[in-house]
Image (cartoon, helix red, strand yellow):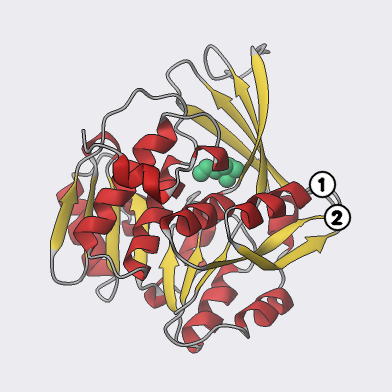
C-alpha cells in the first residue's frame, strides 16, 4: 500500500514581529528567515519521518524551487511526480509574534498550475488501497478526488486552508477527514464556537462513511474511526513557532496508521511529534525524526 501526497510546495518567508500588522499600518520586522514549507511538503516530510513510504506530487516554478525538492529527497520522499511550471514557486509570507503564533499570506504560484493532465499522469501509478492525501493549496482538487476514488484509493482530506472551493469537492468520497474546529463548523454550516461534541456529531452525520480526526487546539484531539471515539491530550512544551505543527500531527497520524499502528498509538505519536515541532522554528525543518518522537515524554 503506497501513499501519494498531492500537495503544495512553498517557500516560507518568516518575519519576526511584535504584533501582526494592522490595516493601514507599516511595521518593521526584527528578522527574516527562509524555510521550506507548504502544507503538502510539510505533511510528506512528516509522513516519511514517521516511517511511511511517500510519493509527493505537485509543482514548483521554473528555477526557484529546486531546494524544496532537495528537502523532500533528504527526508526520503519520492519526488518523481513533482513538475516544473513556468513562473514562480508558491510562497508564504508568515508573521510570527513573540508568543510563537503566526498569520500567513499565501501566493499559490506553481501550486495553482496543476492541471487535469498532471493529475491523470500521476494517478496512473497508483491504485486500489493506496492512500491519497490532500490539503487545499493546489488546483484541480475536485478532479483529483474523483479520479482517485474511481481507482479505489483511500482519500485523506485536510481541508486547510478552508475556503469556498471546499464545498464544490466530492466530499462523499473522503475516507479520512483531518480538520480543526473552525474547518469543522464551516463544513457543517455551524456557528464558530460550537462545542466539540456537537461538531463531531455533525461531522459524523454529514460524512457517515468517513473516519474523522478533529483537532481542538490546547484541548488535544478526538478521533472517530467509525466504531470508537478516541481522545488525545496535547503535550505541553514552550512554544517557539506553531508553523507546521498541524502538518506534523497529520503526517505522524496517517503515517502511523499506514505502518499498522492502532489509533491510540498513532494519536500519541502525532501529539508528541507536534509538540516537538512547536518547540522549534520554521515549517519543514521543525519536523522531528521518529526516534525523537518515541523518546519524547508524554508530559
Ligand atoms: O501549515 C503551515 C504551512 O502553511 C506553511 O509552511 C505555509 O507554507 C502554508 O502553506
Identify the residue under disc 1: 64
Q: Is 261 drawn above or below residue 285 in the view shown?
A: below
Residue 233 is left or right of residue 51, and the answer is: left
Q: Is 291 drawn above or below residue 56 in the view shown?
A: above
Residue 25 visible in the picture? no
Determine the image quadrant of residue 194.
Answer: top left
* x and y, in percent, of residue 57 in the image: 64, 66
Rounded to the nearest whole Å, what is the CA distance between mark 1 and mark 2? 6 Å
Q: Is 295 drawn above or below residue 76 in the view shown?
A: above
Give the quarter of the figure containing the N terminus.
bottom left
Determine the image quadrant of residue 76.
Answer: bottom right
Residue 266 visible in the picture? yes
* x and y, in percent, of residue 172 in the image: 38, 75
Give the quarter of the figure containing the C terminus.
top left
The image quadrant where one finds ligand 1 is: top right
Instruction: Look at 36% across and 53% down and name the residue there.
Output: 179
Near mark 1 (Cα within 10 A), the count class, few <14, some 14-19 or many ≥20, is some
Mark identifier at residue 225: none
* x and y, in percent, of residue 18 in the image: 53, 11
Identify the residue under disc 2: 62
Q: Check whether the beta carbons of the residues at disc 1 and disc 2 lie within 8 A of each other.
A: yes
Amino acid at each position: 500500500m503506497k501513499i501519494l501526497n498531492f500537495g503544495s510546495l512553498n517557500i516560507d518567508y518568516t518575519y519576526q514581529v511584535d504584533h501582526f500588522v494592522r490595516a493601514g499600518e507599516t511595521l518593521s520586522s526584527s528578522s527574516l528567515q527562509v524555510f521550506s514549507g507548504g502544507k503538502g511538503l510539510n505533511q510528506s516530510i512528516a509522513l516519511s519521518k514517521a516511517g511511511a513510504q511517500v510519493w509527493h506530487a505537485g509543482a514548483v516554478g521554473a528555477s526557484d524551487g529546486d531546494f524544496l525538492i532537495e528537502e523532500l529527497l533528504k527526508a526520503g520522499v519520492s519526488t518523481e511526480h513533482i513538475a516544473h511550471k513556468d513562473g514562480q514557486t508558491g510562497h508564504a509570507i508568515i508573521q510570527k509574534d513573540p508568543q510563537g503564533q503566526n498569520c500567513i499570506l499565501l501566493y499559490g504560484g506553481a501550486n495553482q498550475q496543476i492541471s487535469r493532465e498532471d493529475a491523470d499522469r500521476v494517478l496512473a501509478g497508483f491504485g486500489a488501497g493506496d492512500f491519497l492525501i490532500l490539503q487545499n493549496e493546489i488546483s484541480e482538487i475536485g478532479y483529483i478526488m474523483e479520479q482517485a476514488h474511481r481507482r479505489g484509493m483511500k482519500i485523506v482530506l485536510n481541508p486547510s486552508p478552508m475556503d469556498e472551493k471546499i464545498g464544490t469537492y466530492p466530499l462523499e468520497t473522503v475516507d479520512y477527514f483531518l480538520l480543526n474546529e473552525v474547518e469543522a463548523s464551516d463544513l457543517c454550516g455551524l456557528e464558530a464556537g460550537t462545542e466539540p461534541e456537537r461538531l463531531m456529531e455533525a461531522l459524523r452525520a454529514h460524512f457517515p462513511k468517513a473516519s474523522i480526526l478533529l483537532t481542538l487546539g490546547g484541548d488535544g484531539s478526538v478521533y472517530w474511526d467509525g466504531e470508537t471515539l478516541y481522545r488525545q491530550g496535547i503535550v505541553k512544551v514552550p512554544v517557539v513557532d506553531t508553523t507546521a505543527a498541524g502538518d506534523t500531527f497529520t503526517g505522524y497520524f496517517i503515517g502511523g496508521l499506514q505502518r499498522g499502528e492502532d489509533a491510540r498509538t498513532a494519536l500519541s505519536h502525532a501529539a508528541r511529534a507536534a509538540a516537538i515541532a512547536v518547540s522549534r522554528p520554521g515549517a519543514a525543518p521543525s519536523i522531528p525524526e521518529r526516534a525523537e518522537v518515541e523518546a519524547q515524554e508524554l508530559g
